[in-house]
Image (tube, rainbow, N blue to C red):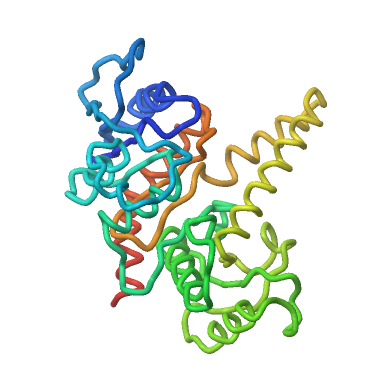
Amino acid sequence: MIRVALDAMGGDLGPRIAFDGAVEILSRHHDVVITIYYSPNSGLELPVPHERLSLISCSDVIDVDEEIVLSLFRRRNSTLYQSLNALAQQSSDVVVTLGNTGAMVALARHILGVLRPKLYPALIRELYSNPLRCLVDLGANVHCPPSMLVGFAELGAAYIEALSDEKPRVGLLNVGVESSKGSAVIRQTDRLLADKMWPDYYGYAEGTELFDGDKNVIVCDGMVGNAVLKASEGLLSFMMSKFKGVDGASSLFETFYQTERRHGACLVGVRGNLVKGHGCSDLSAMIGAIEYGIDIARADLYSAIEARLCS
């Protein structure tokens, strides 16, 4: 059985989509059990009882706009803390949350621990699933020195190896491919990656190579990665709205969005499997994020990455 810990309180649309998503997942996957961590409120209708669904009521919720302060680590009865603690106690195989990204990363490091010293966890988003192609980091880290970016390259390469038959081919996102381009941090990272035996480094990648080209691991700092991701998704939504009503065009965009990549991002570099979905996720995206979590739990992703980077 795959055991999913689902934080129901992080999404903009409330816990209802987590409840409905869990029920739908259980109807699709008969080897999955789900524990939902939620905060009760008046008028909240709970899911119909199911033998593979458990509900755990928590008295605290970490809001999406809360700052990362020391008191966060003492809020042990928050839904996010409780779901991550279940993973640490090995009573679940994966955590899925739509909640506060900064709080999720901070608590995951605190509760689960990192795979190795000085390796910073990073958020990975798949740009394509077949062949597998990913972007790392998406916002777990904003101020990134060269050593941190090198760690992102290693995490991304290990992710590719764990979930596909593809050979990792790393590129460093930059404003051009010429050696003189980029900041001092980018140029130093380029030199460090070029000196490594693994992973294979293919040099700078321009923005046009995010969705096409030889490189299947694109590395950048979290601020750039988050901006790139949201700009790409915004463009896709804009194009879908512009082509709405045009025969075949809108459905083509929707098909690409639904099938070419998984919903949500995966936090790698901590001792556990963790999926972070968009706060604005609707029911379809919630279901997709849970299925992504099931996939990485089946692959025991974190153990595979740990074996590759820490052996």
Number of marks in the rendered image: 0
Tell me if 28 is positioned left or right of 76 in this view: right
Query: In x, y percent, where is residue 270?
Result: 33, 60
Tell me if 92 is positioned left or right of 209 in this view: left
Residue 175, by quadrant, is bottom right
Question: Which quadrant: the C terminus?
Answer: bottom left
Q: Nearer the viewer, residue 231 or 24?
A: 231
User: Residue at 68% of width from left, 48% of height from top?
Assistant: 232
Can you name the residue that lies furthest to the top here? 43
Query: In x, y percent, where is residue 204?
Result: 67, 75
Question: Which quadrant: the N terminus?
Answer: top left
Depicted 40 relative to depicted 156: above or below: above
Query: In x, y percent, where is residue 265?
Result: 48, 49
Can you name the residue that lies furthest to the bottom here? 195
Tell me if 293 is positioned left or right of 165 in this view: left
Depicted 199 relative to depicted 212: above or below: below
Residue 114, by quadrant, is bottom left
Query: In x, y percent, where is residue 217?
Result: 56, 66
Residue 247, by quadrant, is top right
User: Residue at 30% of width from left, 48% of height from top?
Assistant: 71
Q: Nearer the viewer, residue 111 or 212?
A: 111
User: Residue at 54% of width from left, 56% of height from top?
Assistant: 138
User: Residue at 62% of width from left, 77% of height from top?
Assistant: 186
